[in-house]
Image: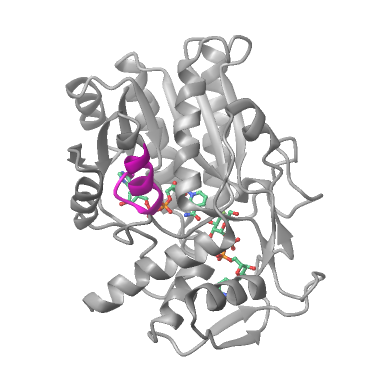
């Protein structure tokens, strides 16, 4: 298939690009580089020994998106372009609604004009809000509690309406849990600007002596060791879920009755912050100093998926272990630390 991958230079997009290229798909990336660096493009091409098309631009530029779809004869779109910093979204909600929601509308409009009706959308477990039960299946009520989560929720609602409006659309909505780790090559990975807000990149920077210790946000949750529990998923498992999503889109037998489907993309296993530290230390032979501090506002005690639907309907399952996640995360950071 000729696949348009928006946001393909970013963390999840670059890994997804590699999975697509490995499977023989033609890949066109559209990215405005607002949270990524063009060097990643060279890494993707060097790892895969394949060429891809790159268009520097914004999904909000409707005419550019249409031209890109037409020029590269796109069959399906995987839409990852978006802003994802929860704290920033609270301070500047309009930025999130414009970039994420308006960006999705612009993309959908371009797809409509160009008669392309196949879409995979990157949503988030954040749409569920505070879990009412665990593990979270796709039937769990949605109740996001910050503008970033709302932006994903609103896009999901738009997609439901679009799918209803015309049966030619086939849409797969993927709700990612906590992607971590990096490609086996160590050349691409999670490389946030500034102080990392997510756990694994912060641990990486402590391991590389760029930060003295990790703040563990809360040691008094009602969990076995008192720290927060999440469903961490290896980024390569996550990127492979997009291949399964494209197969679902492409297989007329599988989507006879419905033309939009939502899937949790997680492992179904929850690990605490202390589990992660311990696994990271053990597999990498490193010490991660940490201090238990106050809870972070907005955090919940535990959040993990029931991925049964993706396992059965998509035939996709996360296969990599926590050790694989921690090892590959450090492998990426280690190579970067040598560069610095
Ligand atoms: P990322 O920031 O690394 O990648 C996003 C890419 O999109 C970047 O390269 C950025 O430059 C580009 N981009 C942003 N706005 C754009 C626009 N208007 N036009 C064109 N390009 C634009 O983020 P990521 O971690 O790779 O996340 C990818 C997607 O998955 C996002 O939509 C995010 O909300 C979603 N998601 C991520 C996580 C996570 O923990 N990483 C969890 C759930 C959902
Ligand atoms: N944590 C720390 N110290 C840190 C960073 C995180 O103790 O420096 C803890 C958090 O309190 C939480 C766990 O590590 O218990 C994971 O935190 P992350 O920030 O890595 O991830 P979140 O679960 O908070 O959120 C992430 C993304 C969201 C996305 C969600 C989906 O940041 O955008 O996963 O499940 F919506």
Between 250 and 64, the one lying in front of the other is 250
| Magenta residues (range) | 7-19
Residue 78 lies in quadrant: top left
Residue 37 on image: x %, y %: 24, 58
The x, y position of residue 216, in whole percent, is 62, 79
Measuring 21% from the left and 20% from the top, which residue is drawn there? 70
| Residue depicted at 26% across the width and 39% down the height | 30
Report the magenta stretch's main SS.
Answer: helix
Tell which of 88 and 290 is nearer to you: 290
Q: Is residue 103 left or right of residue 177?
A: left
Query: Is residue 180 highlighted in magenta?
Result: no
Q: In which quadrant is the C terminus drawn?
A: bottom left
Q: In this rendering, is residue 293 above or below 87?
A: below
Residue 52, position as x, y percentages in the image: 20, 37
Seen at 75% across and 40% down, the residue is 140
Compared to 239, does 255 lie above or below?
Answer: above
In the displayed structure, 7 sits above or below 105; it is below
As rendered, which of 291 and 315 lies closer to the eye? 315
């Amino acid at each position: 298939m000729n696949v348009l991958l928006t946001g393909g230079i970013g963390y999840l997009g670059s890994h997804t690009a590699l999975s697509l290229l490995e499977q023989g798909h033609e890949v066109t990336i559209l990215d405005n580089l607002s949270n990524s660096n063009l060097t990643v493009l060279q890494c993707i091409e060097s790892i895969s020994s394949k060429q891809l098309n790159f268009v520097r631009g914004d999904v909000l530029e409707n005419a550019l998106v249409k031209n890109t779809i037409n020029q590269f004869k796109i069959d399906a779109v995987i839409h990852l372009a978006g802003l994802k910093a929860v704290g920033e979204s609270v301070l500047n909600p309009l930025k999130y609604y414009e970039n994420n929601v308006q960006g999705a509308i612009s993309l959908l409009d371009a797809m409509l004009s160009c008669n392309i009706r196949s879409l995979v959308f990157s949503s988030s477990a954040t749409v569920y809000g505070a879990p009412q039960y665990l593990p979270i299946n796709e039937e769990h009520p949605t109740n996001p509690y910050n503008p970033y989560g709302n932006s994903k929720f609103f896009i999901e609602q738009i997609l439901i309406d679009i799918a209803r409006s015309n049966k030619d659309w086939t849409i797969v909505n993927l709700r990612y849990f906590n992607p971590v780790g990096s490609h086996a090559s160590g050349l691409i990975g999670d490389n946030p600007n500034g102080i990392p807000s997510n756990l694994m990149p912060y641990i990486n920077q402590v391991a590389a002596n760029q930060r003295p210790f990790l703040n563990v946000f809360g040691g008094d949750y009602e969990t076995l060791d008192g720290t927060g529990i999440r469903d961490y998923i290896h980024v390569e498992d996550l990127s492979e879920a997009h291949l399964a999503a494209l197969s679902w889109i492409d297989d007329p037998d599988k989507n006879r009755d419905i033309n939009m489907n939502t899937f949790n993309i997680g492992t179904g296993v929850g690990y605490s912050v202390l589990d992660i530290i311990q696994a990271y230390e053990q597999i990498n032979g490193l010490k991660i100093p940490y201090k238990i501090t106050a809870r972070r506002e907005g955090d919940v005690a535990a959040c993990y998926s029931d991925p049964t639907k993706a396992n059965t309907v998509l035939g996709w399952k996360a296969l990599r272990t926590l050790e694989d996640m921690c090892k590959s995360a450090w492998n990426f950071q280690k190579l970067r630390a040598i560069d610095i």
